[in-house]
Image: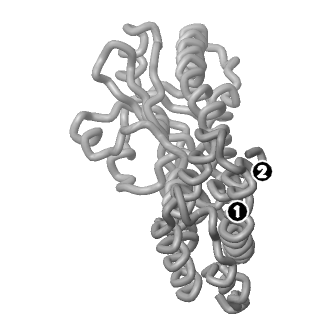
Amino acid sequence: MSQSNRRLTKLKLLANFFENVDVISIYIKTDIIHNLFQENKGLDYSKLELFHLQYTDSVIELLTKIKRQKENDLLAIINEIDINNKYISSFEDKHDNSFETDRRMYSGIFSNQLKSLYKDLTEDKFRLNWENVLYFNKKYATEFYRNEGDEEPLKSAAFPAYKYLDYEIERKLLGRLNIQDFRVRFICGYLISTHEYELFRVFQSDDHFIFDVEGKKMYLIDAKKLEKLDTSPNESNQTSIVDQLKSKNEQLEENINQRKRILPAEVSSVLKDYLQNLENIDIMSTIFDINEETNILRAMLNLNLNNN
């Protein structure tokens, strides 16, 4: 019975691989015959061994040969899926552990920068290091900032401003920031042409302002212009690549499954004859009188599979 169990395991693995209805039916029928002997201890196990030798071993050998061929044929597709999955995993790890964390921290860092700027202006001192905030766009703009859309709503006409070295901040904006203790939230970034902009919202208000990174300006943006902008959270511009790879993998996996199910015409014919032979067996009688000369599986080992 242990030998029979091993044969059934092999046959089940083959049925799982091919997902072919005839192969699955063959496994089920073979399992029924195995269970007949397992549940009736008085039966002669040598007859079960004879059945496996003349039937099961032949079908296992045939299907194993075809499985090896298919695995070789599908190796390039399987490798492509593996490479795509590695890229997808590395991207998702980077996306989760880097940008999302830094984005939240950046709001606090920018708030502190603005508070220090206001303090310096009131004291007529210039102690700020702009690298404190410029690190963010240098690190993430190319990959994450939105690179499509109209740049015009992001621009501003001339406005009354306070000057801090090379930077300008709109007077009205600075006043509103002071009311909210300079607390701001980074909304999203834009990289259009070669120009970088960052959109912020003033805490507990409907006020939004733009940081023109290249122009070194900060100014309020009115509601009409804001409506023209895509203000959804930034996602990596590689997201579309990842989505394409996931879709490609789904197609490749479906292709693999379809190609595994399809068997050469002559193999399908032999398997159908074999299955019919099993279905016609009277388990309680003729199973014990298998005539090797009439065994349909003799044809299996003579099939030429080289071109299939």
Looking at the picture, tell me which residue is in the foreground, 179 or 108.
108
Nearer to us in this view, 216 or 122: 216
In the picture shown, does residue 169 fall above or below 95? above
Quadrant of the drawing holding the N terminus: top right
Q: Going by the image, does 49 lie left or right of 237?
A: right
Q: Please state which of residues 168 and 231 is positioned toward the viewer in this rendering.
A: 231
Residue at screen point 50% across, 43% down: 235
Dot 1 amino acid type? His
- Please give the label number shown on residue 104: none
**Residue 134 placed where, x, y %?**
64, 34
Quickly name the residue at label 1: 52
Picture quarter containing residue 294? bottom right
How many neighbours does mark 2 have within 10 angstroms: few (below 14), some (14-19), or many (20 or more)?
Answer: few
Q: Residue at x 74, y 58 (%)?
A: 49
Is there CB contact under 8 Å for labels 2 and 1?
Answer: yes
Q: In this view, does 244 lie to the left or right of 232?
A: right
Callout 1: 10 Å neighbours few (<14), some, many (20+)?
many
Going by the picture, which residue comes out furthest to the left? 224
Q: Which of 162 and 199 is in front in this view?
A: 199
Q: What residue type is labelled 2?
A: Gln
- Residue annotated with mark 2: 3
Would residue 111 be seen by someone viewing this image from the given angle? yes
Quadrant of image for the C terminus: bottom right
What is the x, y in percent for residue 132? 68, 25
